Image (cartoon, rainbow, N blue to C red):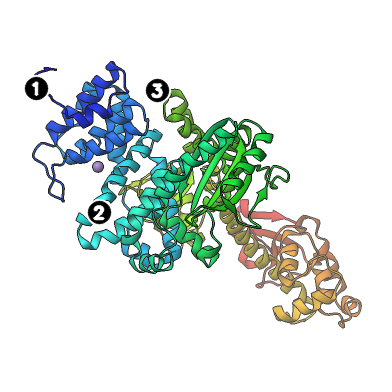
């Protein structure tokens, strides 16, 4: 680089100062390439395009992200908005930088579909948003992709007013409902607050106006107040010779205050609009610090919580107090030791937000704690390649996210097939599934679906689930539906068989079959082990119960013994034909055989044995192999 001609501005030079020479060279190379590629391009605001990636990269540098993230920050729009190929970046830069840039470009292509519907139907919206967050994570192979995407969004939302009017609301809501929660999950609290507060007035203009009115006079320059208070407290503690390990403050963002007012109903009971956190060396220092602060500011009675003496149920320990400063600003102050802090940040509190933030059963749930903790460490850490890939693998190994042709997102365990997909949409769609297209191409039903594929189910009117499906499906939902269907189908066959047997026996006594309702009533009164007519018929169909047992229950007043005397041989022997026991059989109507006759069985099409007289004309000339001696 020629020293005569400054290639980079002073701002950039300043911003990159902290990086070692080697890394700085890489970053500057990225900047120069981006500058060249975006040359002549303008943002909607009219400024040079390159100003946007520069702001994004410098903000990442300022917030202590590693040099690759910063370099990728400069390059993040070249693939999407210029003629640059991904292979060029791979050639010129570290493959990790190229991967981050690739990833950001990919994430940018995921768009919410059905935008109108998403914002008109609240439930649909929440489901989709949750899925959208997951799909964003899933396609992000390296968390730095997501981090960069968030900084990109942050810069874009600062210039949101330049977007076409009709896009502003959507863009702002998407920022609040999707990107801000992602930032929160990644432990990027400041970014989250900025994203929300910059978008609030555009996303929900009416709520914003109401909110501003309700807090008029109560929420004036909270950041300034916090900034003013910090050195005061520090000085006082030092004077008291209390070793301060860290002292930090924050002002609650407008949007998060608005949400809290919504929950609590009034701003008057919210004391943590401004908050300070003091971390000291020992428990005794916690109490001493409390004394110092109370001598400095007026404590609000009833607002001191000693969670050191009496920890919260989740183990959280700290002292909380609420004070008024000289200007009557109310602050919440938390005092704790380092150990308590660690526990609060990575233990109990994370468990708390796990529960609060991730209400749907999500893949993130179990890992959210590690994810946040580790991402926190990611700042300031240079080479964390292994840890990163492991982390993302753990997080997303188990799930895929696919689209319906309408753009709804369906998430399934890895290895799921179109059958699983169909049952996830609706059990009747699963039952009628005959084929599937993935990304427009017809595929076998056992084809595993990959994330972001579009799956279309082909359904037939008369199609039925097959027991073969049980061999390759992945979800228990599909398994249950298929099993239930098969069971029910088999049941129908058994009922039919049972009913036929029953009808035959009934006929022998010249009894008319009862209606199912009447039959149920009789069975209810009985001591039969089967509690309904249909279950009794299944039992008969299966051969688990004799027809006579059911007949006696159904016709309690009928005298079977007398009837038996009338036609003794027939019944006794028909019931006792050993070979026919538990085998479906019918007495042929043509020759009406009696047990005293010489009979022969004919194996019919449905494997039902027809019992004929040997002399019956109809079996003369029948296939020999179908005849069964009885
Ligand atoms: Mn961008």
Residue 284, position in %: x, y?
A: 69, 35
Of residues 552 and 228, the one drawn nearer to the viewer in this rendering: 228
Q: Which residue is mark 2?
A: 160
Sooner in the amino-acid sequence: mark 2 or mark 1: 1
49 to 492, vertically: above or below: above
Q: Quadrant of residue 141?
A: top left
Secondary element at tag 1:
loop
Task: From the image, tell me which residue sits under label 3.
Answer: 382
Residue 607 higher or lower than 389, as above or below:
below
On the question of residue 304 being in view, the answer is yes
Mark 3 vs 1: CB contact within 8 A: no
What separation in Å lies between label 3 and label 2 (alpha carbons)? 33 Å
Label number found at residue 5:
1
Locate residue 240: give its quadrant: top right
In this rendered view, identify the residue nearer to me: 572 or 69: 69
The residue lying at 43 percent from left, 41 percent from top is: 188
Residue pictured at 38% horizontal, 65% vertical:
212
Q: Is mark 1 within 8 Å of ligand 1?
A: no
Dot 3 falls on a residue whose secondary structure is: loop
Q: Label 2: how many residues lie within 10 Å, few (<14), some (14-19) or many (20+)?
A: many
Do labels 2 and 1 touch, CB within 8 Å? no
Say few, some or many: other residues with alpha carbon within 10 Å of mark 3 (under 14 / 14 to 19 / 20 or more).
few
Picture residue at 12% right of the left edge, 17% below the top: 3
Point out the image quarter for the N terminus. Answer: top left
Work out whether mark 3 precedes mark 2 in sequence or the reverse, and give the earlier one. Answer: 2
Q: Identify the element where label 2 is drawn.
A: helix
Query: What's the distance in space between the residues labelled 2 and 1, CA to CA?
Result: 35 Å
From where the camera sits, is residue 604 visible? no
Q: Kindly report which numbered mark, 2 or 1, lies closer to the viewer in this rendering.
A: 1
* Disc 3 from disc 1: Cα separation: 31 Å
Disc nearest the viewer among 3 and 1: 1
> Measured from the top left, where is residue 532 in percent x and y?
75, 71
């Amino acid at each position: 680089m020629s020293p005569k001609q400054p290639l980079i501005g002073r701002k950039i030079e300043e911003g990159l100062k902290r990086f070692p020479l080697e890394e700085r060279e890489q970053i500057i190379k990225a900047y120069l390439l981006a500058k060249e590629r975006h040359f002549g391009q303008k943002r909607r605001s009219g400024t040079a395009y390159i100003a946007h990636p520069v702001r994004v990269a410098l903000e990442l540098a300022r917030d202590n992200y590693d040099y690759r993230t910063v370099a990728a920050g400069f390059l993040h729009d070249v693939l999407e908005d210029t003629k640059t190929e991904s292979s060029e970046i791979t050639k010129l830069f570290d493959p990790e930088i190229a991967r981050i840039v690739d990833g950001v470009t990919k994430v940018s292509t995921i768009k919410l579909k059905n935008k109108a519907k998403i914002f008109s139907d609240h439930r649909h919206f929440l489901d989709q948003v949750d899925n959208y967050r997951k799909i964003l994570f899933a396609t992000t192979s390296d968390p730095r992709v997501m981090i960069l995407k968030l900084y990109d969004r942050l810069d874009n939302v600062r210039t949101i007013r330049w977007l076409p009017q009709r896009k502003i609301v959507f863009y702002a809501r998407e920022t609040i409902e999707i990107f801000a929660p992602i930032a929160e999950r990644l432990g990027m609290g400041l970014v989250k607050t900025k994203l929300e507060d910059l978008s609030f007035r555009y996303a929900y203009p009416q709520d914003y106006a109401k909110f501003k009115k309700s807090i008029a006079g109560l929420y004036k320059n909270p950041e300034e107040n916090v900034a003013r208070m910090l050195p005061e407290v520090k000085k006082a503690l030092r004077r008291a010779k209390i070793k301060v390990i860290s002292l930090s403050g924050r002002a609650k963002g407008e949007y998060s205050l608005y949400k809290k007012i919504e929950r609590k109903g009034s701003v008057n009971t919210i004391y943590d609009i401004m908050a300070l956190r003091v971390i000291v060396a020992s428990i005794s220092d916690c109490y001493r610090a409390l004394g110092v602060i109370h001598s400095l500011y007026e404590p609000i009675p009833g607002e001191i919580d000693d969670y050191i003496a009496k920890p919260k149920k989740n183990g959280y320990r700290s002292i909380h107090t609420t004070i008024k400063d000289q200007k009557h600003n109310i602050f919440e102050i938390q005092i704790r030791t380092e150990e308590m802090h660690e526990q609060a940040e990575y233990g109990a509190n994370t468990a708390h937000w796990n529960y609060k933030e991730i209400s749907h059963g999500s893949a993130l749930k179990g890992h959210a704690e590690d994810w946040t903790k580790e991402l926190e460490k990611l700042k300031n850490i240079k080479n964390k390649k292994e840890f990163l890939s492991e982390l993302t693998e753990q997080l997303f190994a188990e799930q895929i996210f696919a689209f319906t042709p309408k753009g709804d997102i369906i998430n399934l365990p890895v290895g799921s097939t179109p059958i699983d997909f169909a049952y996830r949409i609706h059990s009747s769609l699963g039952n009628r599934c005959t084929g599937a297209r993935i990304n427009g191409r017809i595929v076998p039903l056992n084809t595993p679906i990959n994330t972001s594929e579009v799956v279309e189910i082909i359904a037939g009117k008369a199609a039925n689930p097959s027991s073969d499906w049980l061999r390759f499906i992945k979800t228990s939902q599909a398994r249950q539906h298929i099993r239930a269907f098969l069971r029910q189908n088999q049941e129908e066959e058994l009922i039919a068989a049972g009913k036929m047997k029953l009808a035959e026996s009934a006929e022998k006594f010249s009894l008319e079959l009862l209606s199912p309702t009447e039959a149920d009533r009789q069975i209810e009164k009985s001591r039969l082990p089967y509690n309904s007519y249909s279950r009794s018929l299944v039992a008969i169909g299966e051969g688990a119960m004799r027809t006579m047992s059911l007949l006696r229950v159904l016709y309690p007043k009928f005298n079977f013994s007398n009837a038996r005397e009338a036609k003794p041989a027939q019944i006794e022997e028909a019931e006792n034909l050993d070979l026919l026991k538990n085998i479906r059989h019918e007495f042929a109507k043509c020759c009406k055989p009696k047990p005293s006759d010489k009979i022969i069985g004919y194996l019919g099409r449905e494997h039902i044995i027809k019992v004929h007289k040997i002399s019956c004309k109809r079996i003369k000339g029948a296939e020999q192999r179908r005849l069964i001696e009885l």
